[in-house]
Amino acid sequence: MKIVTYNLRFGGRANQRTHWNQVFETIDPDIFLVQETCDPRLYMNHETWESHRHQVHWTKAANRPWGSAIFVKSGSLVPIAMPEFSGYLVGVELDKFDWSATLKRSLRVFSIHAPVPYKRTVNQILDFIASLPGDRELIIGGDFNLTTGIRHPSESLQGDNRWFLERLRKEFNLLNCWQTANPNRDLPQTLRWSGDQTKPYHCDGIFAPACWYQYLEECKVLSAPTWDNLSDHNPVVAVFSEKEEFRNQNQLVAKKEMRRRVIAGGSSRSVSKTRQEAGGKTIANSSIHPFQVS
């Protein structure tokens, strides 16, 4: 499974709105969190839009041509009403999301583009998310306009944003995908600020449930001329995949269940149904402890 977050910078140039298609063609995301995007229809041809329109939720920011959006490749998407920050914060509740890794609950997904004043609004956004029922796994990603990682003492752009990272970890039980997948590395640049494009601003990030730690394969910041020419932000991509031992356990469960049904006198139809049901199950490990950032 691939999760991508990408700020398009003012929606992109009118004659160069290829961002969505480029993400679809080169990354093929399962979840796409988008900030400063115009109406997604402007980035796709009619056929592509018609095939994706029911999997996209976009809201426009007040007095802006752009807003924020979420795309999901599969599942049933229900938008979450936002009392504040419309167009800067979008959220969806997602059921029947097609990923084979262990998910005991459905998803709640948010794309954030923090407006000024950054610290206060990020706190208010997290307050709102915390007010929702805790009955779903949570993904939060986007452009926080705060450093989304802990820097080494030798790095530049030192800040006091540890409170924000600690809140995501302790209160929401989320792991920082980039820093978890890339331990003991300096934070890469995700924003090439027009005032000084050499400064390594790292304000874009993806935060996923800590219990997904075992599935996290990699998290990377994409940097190449094909991306740099489209926006002053770089896409961040987190990749999750089910471990081989869990696939083997799933197959074992399916075989045992079919054997039990056959011994019990189940019909071939019930055995076939059992194969379909068991094949879609995964083994939950309730003893997994939340990942702790050292």
Image (cartoon, rainbow, N blue to C red):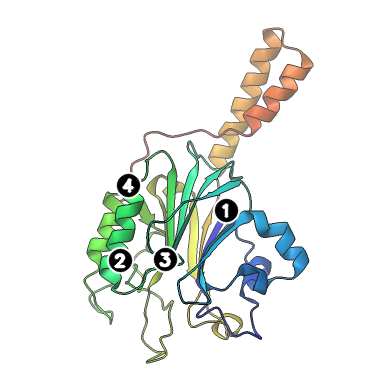
CA gap, disc 4 to disc 2?
A: 15 Å
In the rendered structure, which disc, 4 or 3, sits on the residue that comes first in sequence? 4
Q: Which residue is mark 4?
A: 131
**Residue at mark 3:** 205
Residue at mark 2 to residue at mark 3: CA–CA distance: 17 Å
Element assignment for label 4: loop
* Local SS, label 2: helix
Q: Give the CA distance from mark 1 to mark 4.
A: 28 Å
Residue receiving disc 1: 1
Badge 1 marks a residue whose secondary structure is loop
User: What is the secondary structure assignment of the residue under circle 3?
Assistant: strand
Residue type, numbered disc 3: Gly
Q: Is residue 133 left or right of residue 119?
A: right
Mark closer to the chain start, 2 or 3: 2
Residue positioned 41% across, 38% down in the render: 135
Mark 2 crowd level (few <14, some 14–19, many ≥20, 10 Å Cα):
some
> Of label 3 and label 1, which has the lower sequence position?
1
Q: CA distance from mark 3 to mark 1?
A: 16 Å
- List x then y, in percent, for residue 273: 71, 24
Q: Quadrant of residue 13?
A: bottom right
- The answer to which image quadrant residue 188 occupies is bottom left
Numbered circle sitting on residue 121: 2
- Tell me residue 121's x, y (percent): 30, 66
The structure residue drawn at horizontal position 36% and vertical position 34%, both measured from the top left corner, is 287
Quarter of the image for residue 120 reads bottom left
Q: Amino acid at mark 4?
A: Ser
